[in-house]
Image (tube, rainbow, N blue to C red):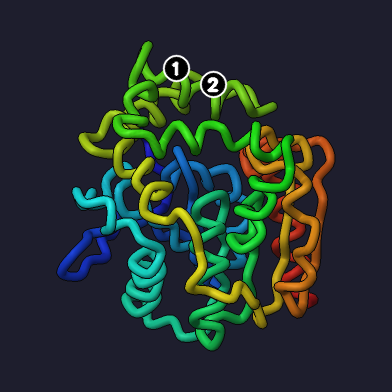
């Protein structure tokens, strides 16, 4: 798999995990967190648009691709996931940075912003439900409950098994089939290679198993926040945006009407423009 030209590969580690991380660009630091079933590569379309203005720090989250894959479900609890972000920040001597998250990376980012607001100057969330709202919407909204049916499957014993069937057919449909972007052969191969890493798929599913609720958190966000949402998302329906104002003090909401859950793949230029606008003028 060819890496982004000029990128550095580093490993950030502590006693528990070793996180494979891509670093590229100069300027203000941004840490970008991918979701399920992605890896650092999910941000690659944004890199050309941002690398001249920002230092991009893009890890494979614990359990994914070339990062460590702890075996226990509890190793994927949200308190450990936010500490991984803090570890990356320390590694790069960051005490004031922007955190960007998509999908599970967004959920981690929401909680990180609540717990460590002083470390962040801005928060950017892309198609990731607010963790305090998401459970409520699944319970109260039929459309979102149906869209989240895969989560209930993951929570069953051996619920991850079907993801391996027919050469990762379900994952291919969830990413390549659910996106408006036409993925090239080499891109598909990169994803299949990441999914094929021993333990990677089970680790991704363990994020759901380890974090069935977020009762220990208030969900209140004081950090200035940009929330972008592709409105044709098959998994995180627009209904999750209702009520977000009550959790976020300083919110800019950008709805991208003709994009899906995979908006960074489909509209990288639009996403990059909104990021720059928010960071330069907010």
**Label 1–label 2 contact, CB within 8 A:** yes
Residue 116 is left or right of residue 134, and the answer is left
Viewer-nearest residue: 62 or 9: 62
Instruction: Please tell me in which quadrant of the rendered image residue 253 appears.
Output: bottom right
> Is residue 66 depicted above or below 105 in this figure?
above
Q: Residues within 10 Å of mark 2 (few under 14, many from 20)?
A: few
Quarter of the image with the N terminus is top left
Residue 9 visible in the displayed image: no
Residue 197 placed where, x, y %?
25, 34
Residue that appears at 56% across and 80% down: 120
Residue 94 placed where, x, y %?
43, 81
Real-space Cα separation, disc 1 to disc 2, in angstroms: 6 Å
> Is residue 107 depicted above or below 198 in this figure?
below
Which numbered circle lies on residue 16?
none
Instruction: Please tell me in which quadrant of the rendered image residue 163 appears.
Output: top left
Residue highlighted by disc 2 = 173
Which numbered circle lies on residue 169?
1
> Is residue 207 depicted above or below 219 in this figure?
above
Q: Residues within 10 Å of mark 1 (few under 14, many from 20)?
A: some
Residue that appears at 72% across and 60% down: 227
Residue 39 is left or right of residue 100, and the answer is left
Quarter of the image with the C terminus is bottom right
């Amino acid at each position: 798999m060819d890496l982004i030209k000029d990128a550095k590969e580093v490993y950030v580690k502590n006693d528990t995990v070793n996180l494979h991380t891509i670093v590229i660009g100069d300027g203000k630091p941004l840490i970008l967190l991918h979701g399920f079933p992605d890896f650092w590569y999910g941000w690659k379309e944004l890199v050309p648009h941002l690398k001249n203005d920002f230092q991009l720090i893009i890890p494979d989250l614990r359990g994914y691709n070339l990062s460590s894959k702890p075996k226990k479900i509890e190793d994927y609890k949200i308190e450990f996931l936010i500490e991984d972000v803090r570890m990356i920040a320390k590694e790069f001597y960051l005490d004031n940075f922007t955190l960007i998250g998509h999908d599970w990376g967004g959920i981690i980012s929401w909680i990180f912003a609540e717990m460590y607001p002083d470390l962040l100057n801005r928060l950017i969330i892309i198609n990731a439900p607010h963790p305090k709202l998401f459970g409520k919407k699944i319970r109260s909204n039929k459309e979102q409950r149906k869209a989240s049916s895969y989560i209930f499957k993951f929570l069953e014993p051996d619920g991850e098994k079907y993801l391996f069937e027919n050469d990762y057919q379900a994952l291919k449909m969830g990413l390549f089939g659910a996106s408006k972007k036409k993925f090239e052969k080499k891109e598909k191969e990169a994803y299949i290679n990441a999914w094929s890493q021993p333990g990677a798929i089970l680790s991704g599913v363990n994020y759901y198993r380890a974090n069935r609720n977020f009762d220990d958190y208030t969900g209140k966000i004081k950090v200035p926040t940009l929330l972008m949402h592709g409105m044709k998302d098959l998994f995180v329906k627009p209904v999750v945006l209702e009520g977000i104002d009550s959790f976020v003090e300083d919110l800019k909401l950008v709805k991208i009407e003709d994009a899906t859950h995979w908006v960074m793949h489909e509209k990288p230029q639009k996403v990059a423009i909104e990021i720059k606008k928010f960071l330069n003028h907010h």
